[in-house]
Amino acid sequence: MSRPQTLVQRALGGHAAIGLLVSALLYLIALSGTIVVIHDRWQRWEQPTIAETAVMTPQAAQAAMAAGLAQDAGKPATTHLYLRMPTADLPRAVVTTDHGGWYVDASGRVTGPEAHAWTEFVIALHEYLHLPASWGMILVGALGVALCALVLTGVLAHPRIVRDAFRLRMRHNDQIARADWHNRLGVWTLPFVLAVALTGAFIGLGSVGFSVLAKASGGTLEQAYAPIFGTEPPADAAPAPLADIAAALATLHARMPDAAPTYVIVHDPATRGSHVQIIAELPRRLIYGETFTFDPAGRFTGALGLSDGAIGKQVAASTYNLHFGNYGGLAVEAAYMLLGLALCVVTATGTTLWLQKRRRRGLGGTHLAAAWAVIVWGAPLVLVATIWLRALAGAEAPLVAAFWGSLAAALVVAAVRPGWVLALPLRDATAAGTIATALVHLALFHAAPLPVLGIDAAMALCGAALMLLPRMVAPRPARYGNAAVPA
């Protein structure tokens, strides 16, 4: 009769089972999430020759909106007109309609199309894995729940978690070193992982909850969202002049001088039923911004209350910045990226430890190990390759098809010829590709703004670290008697 399992054994079994079910997709989300923390900076890096401006006057904003609307001549009427105001992370103004986006200069004149396709490709990978948006966000939200479960079972499976928090035997044999990296990084990143997992689950599954609420109450999805994000006034398609954005911005500045506008949105522009919303960041607040509303003449009509309304509104509005690290400037972004890389390591080492355990038990696993190498090192290598595809083929390059097609082809090779897929060469190829990309970009755009060149330098350093650090901290071979045997 078998003995009943202890809590630690059950937790460890649950931890392994959940990890195996979600590890590949969780790794892709962690990897892409680490990259998109600085998505505004990537946008500058991808289009480094665009003229930049630190500020935009209300009059220039009015001109930019009119110029954006003019770009839609001959096309169906746009339902929304957006102006992204310049910020410290992205000192560029962008006007967007339902049909495209354009950069505008400090006077509001169009200077070129917005074409940061690679940045948008990585954002979409993180937010919904390139699936249809609703289904993809549900899946990503469910993965956030699974990550919370992994954290809980991981803690329960390690009763000495506090005592061993600083025990890192990275020069011991491969199994011990990898287990210590997995466990220690898992402990050190615990608050961060819980924060991003819970907020990611909230964002991803929130749409499901609101859809259920709308169906249960017999209303629409817009009505379900209304208590948080407000309602739309009645539509009136009769032609009218473009709303007075300049007056709205001037009014906001007079009422709240500390508010920093980030987005100006005109609903149903150039119609009698149009209205204006301005999203503005407030100092020392975690919320993504307060939303202020104005009539077509630029008169203030109210605010949504995301900054001072019901606590539920404030929590909902704070979720996005807490998840993506869009607060506290570059220091917080750097911390999020380092913690995101740590989560990638935890995810990668967890499945690798399980594969090693299978091999020690004589259960094989060569094909699975090859497939996992494709995920861990093939995915970042293909991401680097898509940068080159974007550079050579332009903004219309099929980045999604190239990424998933290449990854699928590599997994087929791993299944048919696992001996052809080796983790170390893939890792070195990823490092070399990252360094080469940074150096070529630096050579082509050496006159770009300093933050753009900073990304080149960071990429080169990351590539060098990826190539050198694993060799510097490589575990010692296990020793049996006087013979050195690879672990």
Image (spheres, rainbow, N blue to C red):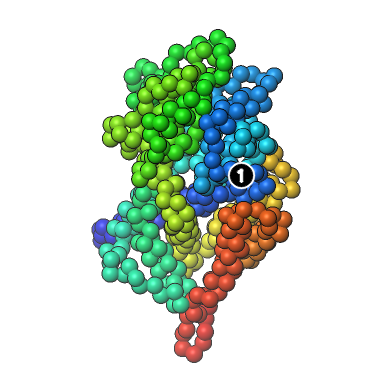
Residue sitting at x 42%, y 48%: 327
Residue 412 visible from this viewpoint: no
Callout 1: helix, strand or loop? Answer: loop
Q: Is residue 376 above or below residue 50?
A: below
Q: Badge 1, how many Cα within 10 Å: few under 14, some, many 20+?
A: some
40 relative position to 391: left or right: left
Residue 323: horizontal and vertical position, in percent?
41, 46
State the residue in front, 182 or 226. Answer: 226
Specify the quadrant of the image occupied by residue 75.
top right
Circle 1: residue type: Glu
Residue sitting at x 57%, y 61%: 458
Specify the quadrant of the image occupied by residue 228.
top left
Q: Residue furthest bottom?
A: 482
Q: Residue furthest right?
A: 392
456 relative position to 260: left or right: right
Residue 158: horizontal and vertical position, in percent?
31, 63
State the residue in front, 233 or 295. Answer: 295
Tell me how many marks there are: 1
Identify residue for label 1.
52
Q: Quadrant of the N terminus?
A: bottom left
Q: Is residue 135 above or below residue 370?
A: above
